[in-house]
Amino acid sequence: MFASCGIEYGGYLLDHGSSWWRGPDLFAVVSEPYQVKGEEVATLTASCAAYDLSVKVTGEHAVHFPPYTLAVIVARSRERIPPRDE
């Protein structure tokens, strides 16, 4: 699912990658880069939109090295991203 839109871990935007699961189902991939550039997020968002994936950038879900990283969450558009404490 996610590999089909060119998402690969590594580089600036997709760094410190992890996966979120609901039971046996992968529902999001998360990256926690130290740098987030608007043009990179725009490119990622555009490439993922063709596959019905959404991109969310948030500090709430960053656990790698807060407050120095942000979470970049890529999930199916219909998925609800739960609050961090949920």
Image (spheres, rainbow, N blue to C red):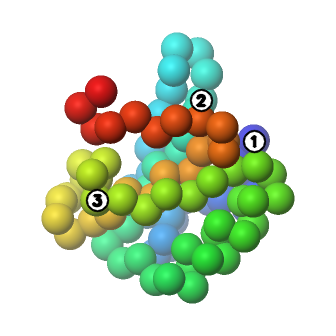
Residue type (three-letter) at the residue carrying disc 2: Leu
User: Which numbered dot is residue 1?
Assistant: 1
Residue type (three-letter) at the residue carrying disc 1: Met
Left or right, residue 48 beside residue 34:
right
Residue 33: x and y in percent read 37, 67
N-terminal of the two: label 1 or label 2? 1
Reply above or below: 30 against 58: above
Q: Secondary structure at mark 2?
A: strand
Q: Quadrant of the N terminus?
A: top right
Residue 52: x and y in percent read 76, 49
Disc 2 to disc 3, C-alpha distance: 22 Å
Residue found 48% across the figure and 71% down from its top = 13
Instruction: State the residue position of label 3.
Output: 59
Residue type (three-letter) at the residue carrying disc 3: Gly
Tags 1 and 2 in contact by the CB under 8 Å rule? Answer: yes
Residue found 27% across the figure and 52% down from its top = 60
Instruction: State the residue position of label 2.
Output: 26
